[in-house]
Amino acid sequence: MLERVQRIALARILSDLIEADFIVEEKEMDFFEEIISKDGFNISESMLIEAKRMDFAKAMSILKELDGETRKELVETLKRLSLSDGTCVPLEAVLIYCVIMALTENANVFSVPSEGINMENMTAVYVENTEGTDIDAAIRNQLKQIEEEFANAGFDFIYIPSVVDDFRALGKKYLHKVVKYMIPSASTLRIDEICYSLCNLSTSRFCRDLLYKKIGVNLIDSNPSLLIKINESDIIDSFGDDDAERTRFSNFLQIELTDDVINTIHRLVNTYREMINADIVAKRRSRSNKFLYFGFHRSLFDLIAYGKEKKDCRLVFDFSTHTAKVYFESMDCDERFILKLNPQEAALYMMIVRKSLEGNGLDWREHISKAEKKKLLGEYNNIYSYIGKGNIVNEYKDRTQTHHIKTRIKVMSGLANAEMFIPEHVKCGLMSFYRIKAPKEYVTFILPKGESSFPTL
């Protein structure tokens, strides 16, 4: 039997799979009801509601904790669901492939707010952080074969230098005219900057300046990889009865490449093809001596021209006025991003952060001694007393609050280093913690007026 949070994570994946082809079939609903029934995975209505508040990457990180046999069972369930309407289409197959790779091959999944991202699903981009690698040379030497392999499977393979060559081939005068037309308010200097970036962008700069600083996918320390746009999900950012507040997230799969690039790609494509029983439409990238404003050419132009650069920030807990004021401040102190939390959420988040800075994180075991729980509740209520209504809380562990904190941070589009501040649930043997990754220099506590220190943890 799956744990509650694992069933919530599974419900998130099931939801994405059902909606992958933009059509919800009655037979899919029938099989879905069978899956969530008590005879299936026993997923309750409250779990389905919570699943809509969980992003795809978080769901995958939770399911990675399962044993091998249970992982296989989940994958088979997804395959059966995709075929419940008689057809497994490419967008369903690529999502199942993502699950397989994340659960069995240690591939990474990223979910980031879609604002400013115009990348199409089933786009596979080669990414690296160091110029002149052996893998880059192998791809460059076999580019046509790789493009053909992906195109025949319905993917659009992107090699950044090829796209840059297309922009460069337009000529300075033509490109300058187009950029001026697209952004008539831009200064000559800004137009020159955009044209220069379009014609001189390297793969490593794409990873650093666009993927990380503008999209929020951090591959700065990664090995050469394929980054595949899988799908988009709507995450509900509300904890009442109204599900109208939603944020769209883009989901990406990162697969690290080995020296044997062609065989790696061949295995990828074959595994994907084995799940499809529908026609595949080949996707071949257009070659033209004209300015193309669609596909990845548009994605790249929009990111360079319009994409807002995210900033590395520090986390600030400012309880100086006895209110739950929590915000992120850019390292240059030029900008603030308010984190909207109620007093209980702010107190819980502060507990998680402070315990992370002092040790492993906030104890989240199901069963702890009365003395340990009393001590932790005392610490929580001391913090809560600064910003709450004076009432005493009898339980600090609240998964709804931790999910809310995570979602609020994830939807803050201005943070480049948001990932280090998002609470993560870590299990190690019998121990269980909620913690953040940020080091001490990225966190600031501002004391209430007249107080010399916060309660000792």
Image (tube, rainbow, N blue to C red):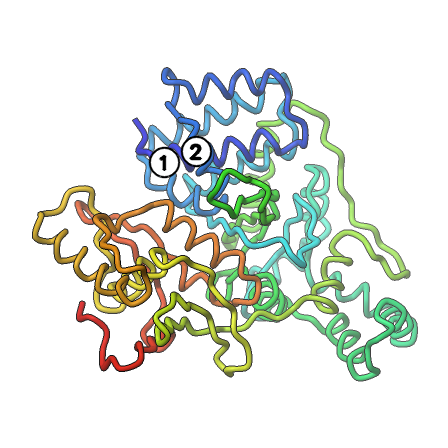
Secondary structure under the numbered disc 1 in the rendered image = helix
Q: Which residue is mark 2?
A: 10
Residue at the spot x=55%, y=54% of the render? 112
| Vertical order, 47 against 189 (above or below) | above
Name the side, left or right, on which 149 lies relative to 326.
Answer: right
The percent position of residue 160, horizontal first and vertical second, equals: 69, 62
| Vertical order, 430 against 301 (above or below) | above
Name the side, left or right, on which 428 lies relative to 13.
Answer: left
Residue type marked 2: Leu
Q: Which is nearer the eye, 228 or 266? A: 228
Residue 414: mark: none
Residue 6: mark: 1
- Determine the CA span between mark 1 and mark 2: 6 Å
Residue type marked 1: Gln
Name the side, left or right, on which 146 lies relative to 381.
Answer: right
Q: Are marks 1 and 2 in contact (CB under 8 Å)?
A: yes
The percent position of residue 310, horizontal first and vertical second, equals: 57, 69
Q: Residues within 10 Å of mark 1 (few under 14, many from 20)?
A: many
